[in-house]
Image (cartoon, grey):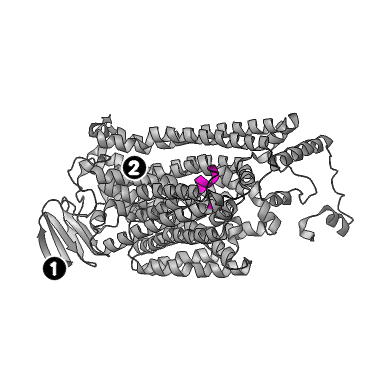
Amino acid sequence: MTGDDGEPGAASQGATVRRPPRRKKVILAEAKGQRGLARTIVELEEQTSVGEHLVRTLVRAQLRTALMMTMLVVAGMTSLPMLFYLLPAFADFSVFGVRLSWVLLVLVPYPLMYGVGAWYVRRADRHEQDFVNMVDR
Amino acid sequence: MLPLLTIAAVVLSTFAIGYYGSRAANTSRDFLVARRRVSSRQNAAAIAGEFLSASSFLGVAGLVMKNGPDQFWYAIGSTAGYLTLLLFVAAPLRRSGAYTLPDFAEARLGSRGLRVVATVVTIAIGYIYLIPQLQNAGLTLSMVIPQTPRWAGVMLVTGVIIVNVLGGGMRVITLVQAFQYWVKLFAIAAPAFVLFAVFFVDSSQGTRSGLTSAASPVFTANTTVTLDESVRVRVAEPVRLRASGTVDGHGVDGEVTWTAGAKDVAANTTLSFPAGATVPVVVGTVASNADWVRPQSGGKAALFNTYSVIFATFLGVLGLPHVLARFYTNPDGRSARRTTLHVLVLLGVFYLFPAILGALGRLYEPGLLTVGRTDATLLLLPSVMIPNVVGQVLGAIVAAGAFAAFMSTSSGLLVSLAGVIATDMSRGRVKDFRWFTVLVMIIPVSLALVLRPHDITLAVGMALAMAASTFCPVLVLGIWWRELTWVGAGIGMTVGGLLVAAAMTVTAISDYTGGWAPTLVQQPALLTVPLAFGTMIVVSKATSRRQPEDINRIMLRLHAPDPLGFVKDRDVLRFGEGRADGRHRRIRPRRWRARWSRA
């Protein structure tokens, strides 16, 4: 340990003028939580069939959500080139002098992707929370 | 002079932020823990800052100017690449604790041999990405400061990034890269707003007609262009011009009339067109404005190309070496997801502007279509549209933004390449890392000086195709499919990588010999990505005995929620427990802790 690590011991050792290190609050309840945590980790790491099943279920749920979101993007965006190719009238369509195709390619994709992403993050977090709750019991 | 000042300002402020930042954080502990004090917003700005290369900054506008809205897919795809990253890779990859792709391959599949393959592919992707950045730095500098030789810009960027990496400035790279995102956003947004206002005034006063009122782009003023590469141009309507140099193999000097057809114009030829003449365009450019403005007007080949770009970008971003290293700065898997979500916003905002500027470029700066240097659109557009000091200032701002783009992407690539090579080929000491930082640059710098510059976005598209055909399947299958084996991953990466490399070679040869390469070869991802995935799956099935024995534990680590504490680099977490003033700091997010004690 070197001085610039800022260990409280080092600070009080050097100069008596300095005020003593702050008091620390010790919360015992957390220690109990920690023990529970360790137990579940051991259970999962020992690869009991229950533990393995739990992990497989989580992975499958996450993958299903990700694939669902991919389908949304594929349906909403990557079908556009094919539509423009098959329906030139659609590609040329304009409203008030603004071409719909340009709006669809410049403005629409980014909010759409953000929406899909935000939805995925919420669902993925929920799956993980469910997993934590299940493991804890 | 003005661009020189702004470029110097960006370079110096990069150094300054790096220097002061590294003074503030100078113990290894600070270095490790600092990343945990970075909010996911700031982290996202850093990721976007590193990702937005010259290809996004200059290249997309240039391609839009040339070929119309089909080229938006490069911008959409780059953003979508981060969405793919978010959906399939971000959190598990962060939890794997891998710092580089070779690390991930070895940790997941347990094979040293695979690590070597992954290292070679990383270097290949890095070089393919780096070379066009350097080349364009040279082109840009010689464009904004006339009479500068092309190697000057290459050497300037190389020098700056090497000094920055060696000087330890990389400690606060998050800060530097985040700063450069905002520089780039400002440097593209400010000209876009001003120039669009100018266009609006012009068209409402009737001094300038809309884009589609003429059948083809026409010169709006008397225009003189000098070619610095030989090009083949297509003449749509007969045009009278003054030429001095070599055309179709014959020396010319004086007034000539070009009839419709193709012309080969040699380098260093000067062409002067009168106002109102139809612009002869480089072969491969969409000549008719009606076709240009409509998406998918190029028939089956263009459709194939669009889907190939979609494959390359949607799946390629997650295999870029500098992108992955940056994800490691997230404290855990959940924050990796949040950061990626912010990246989607930042990229989306940025990519609104190249579209506008590309369209304005076709209207105001059609001479670039003759020269085949549409990558320079953004640099020249302000001074063409506003021929006074305001235009010059805007042009200088764009030049500074372009240099921010060259530097941020190149230094990110350099750090990750030097890191990969130093850990694989040496004992990984800081001294080794510094040596490799210099050595790594020798090959890309010499290739950048020798090879003929291509449209930067197309060149970067090749790097994305390479990443999509090699690392994307390894990452996606490795994270979600238990049965992947190292044999399957190795053979799949080799097949995908070699196919893309072959396509690149053919494209390069065709560049020198008249551009005959079909679309499939110029952007091969639509074919190579499914082939790489298929090879990996089939070979893994055939070699199922070679699955890692601890596959269950690996899957657990990749997918288990962060509060369970399976993240591999837990010792790094422990670093942060104490603070200099003796107080204790929570490491895990409060919300999780609260839920945990309630449960």
Dot 1 amino acid type: Val
Label placed on residue B196: 2
User: Residue B266 location in percent, x, y?
Assistant: 21, 66
- Helix, strand or loop at label 2? It is helix
The quadrant where residue B272 appears: bottom left
Dot 2 amino acid type: Phe
**Magenta region, residue range:** B475-485
User: Residue A83 location in percent, x, y?
Assistant: 29, 34
Mark 1 is surrounded, within 10 Å at the Cα level, by few (under 14), some (14 to 19) or many (20 or more) other residues, namely some
Q: Are marks 2 and 1 in contact (CB under 8 Å)?
A: no
Give the total of numbered labels: 2
Label 1 chain ID: B
The quadrant where residue B207 appears: top left
Report, in whole angstroms, how far the alpha carbon at label 2 lies from the one at label 1. 39 Å
Mark 2 is surrounded, within 10 Å at the Cα level, by few (under 14), some (14 to 19) or many (20 or more) other residues, namely some
* Residue at point 28%, 40% (across, down): B295
Asked if the stretch drawn in magenta spans residue B510, the answer is no
Please state, as top left, top right, bottom left or bottom right, where the N terminus of chain B lies in the image. Answer: bottom left
Q: Nearer the viewer, residue B355 or B19?
A: B355
Left or right: A127 as drawn, with respect to B215: right
User: Residue B527 location in percent, x, y?
Assistant: 35, 48
For the residues carrying marks 2 and 1, which lies nearer the camera in this image?
1
* Residue at point 46%, 47% (across, down): B537
Q: Nearer the viewer, residue B528 or B350?
A: B528
B91 vs B389: above or below:
above
Label 2 chain ID: B
* Residue at point 21%, 52% (across, down): B221
The residue singled out by tag 1 in the image is B252
Q: Nearer the viewer, residue B274 or B136?
A: B136
- Dots 2 and 1 on the same chain: yes
**Marked residue nearer the N-terminal end (2 or 1):** 2
